[in-house]
Image: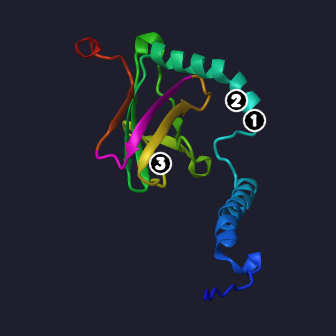
Amino acid sequence: MNTLTTHPPKPWYREPWPWILMAGPFIVVVAAIFTAWLAVSTSDGLVSEDYYKKGLAVNETLTESAKARSLGLRAGVRLVEGSVRVRLSGRAEAGFSAPSSIFITLSHPTRAGVDQTEKLVMQGDAYVGKLNLPSSGHWLVLLEDEAKSWRLMASVMLPSSGETVIGGEVPADIRN
């Protein structure tokens, strides 16, 4: 005698495999909705609203940097907690005369919301001013006079333990 008991088949929703197979696509759909929400609700700091105007200003920027080279400008920048000190020198025979004040802009390459610009005034042999020292990492330092006729720019790693030198001639023994 053969005693095989047959059970009626379960409905599909009572089996584990359809649910396991549907879990993958469901997770992907939820992740896609979250990614779309994240893209719409957050700002992209790298995209500039006035990109066309900034593109037109490139030639002016190059001219200002060339003017700084022709004047032989050299700046020593020291960023200390809460303040900044800049020693500026140039060739008098090229027409450089120290301005009464300069502007410093400290900007992050990827986070536009943390950029700072401060006016530095001459005190003794250096320009000094207050500056909130930003978080550590790679930062761009830009120095300009009030008339924006010249500019010096360099990248620095913060925190900095000493003075960062921007501009000036590269000594002959370093060029080769």
Expressed as whole percent of the image width and height from the top left, the position of residue 160 reads: 33, 46
Q: Residue drawn at (74%, 80%), measured in percent from left and top? A: 9
Q: Position of residue 153 (x, y in %)?
A: 48, 30
- Residue 80's place in the image compared with 163, above or below, is below
Please give left or right for residue 100 compared with residue 22 in the image: left
Residue at horizontal 38 percent and vertical 43 percent from the top: 157
The answer, for residue 51, to whether it is visible in the render is: yes
- Here the colouring is rainbow
Number of residues whose C-alpha sits closer than 10 Å to that of mark 3, classed few (under 14), some (14–19) or many (20 or more): some
- Which residue is denoted by mark 1 in the rendering? 50
Foreground: disc 3 or disc 2: 2
> In percent of the image, x 75 and y 40: which residue is there?
49
> Which residue in the structure is indicated by mark 2?
54
Q: Is residue 174 magenta?
A: no
Inspect the image, locate mark 1, and give the three-letter code of the amino acid beneath it. Asp
Circles 2 and 1 in contact, beta carbons < 8 Å: yes
Provide the secondary structure element on which disc 1 rests: loop
The residues bearing labels 3 and 2 have C-alpha atoms spaced at a distance of 28 Å
Q: On the image, which quarter does residue 35 sit in?
A: bottom right
Q: Secondary structure at mark 3?
A: strand
Question: Where is 141 relative to 133, above or below?
Answer: above
Q: Which residues are magenta?
A: 150-161
In this rendering, is residue 63 above or below 145? above
Asked whether the beta carbons under mark 3 and mark 2 sit within 8 Å of each other, the answer is: no
Along the viewing direction, whichever of 6 and 173 lies nearer the viewer: 6
In which quadrant is the N terminus drawn? bottom right
Residue 155 is covered by the magenta coloring: yes
Type of amino acid at the residue the image marks with label 3: Gly
Query: To which residue does mark 3 refer?
Result: 129
Nearer to us in this view, 52 or 125 = 52
Q: Assign a secondary structure to mark 2.
A: helix
- The answer, for residue 100, to whether it is visible in the render is no
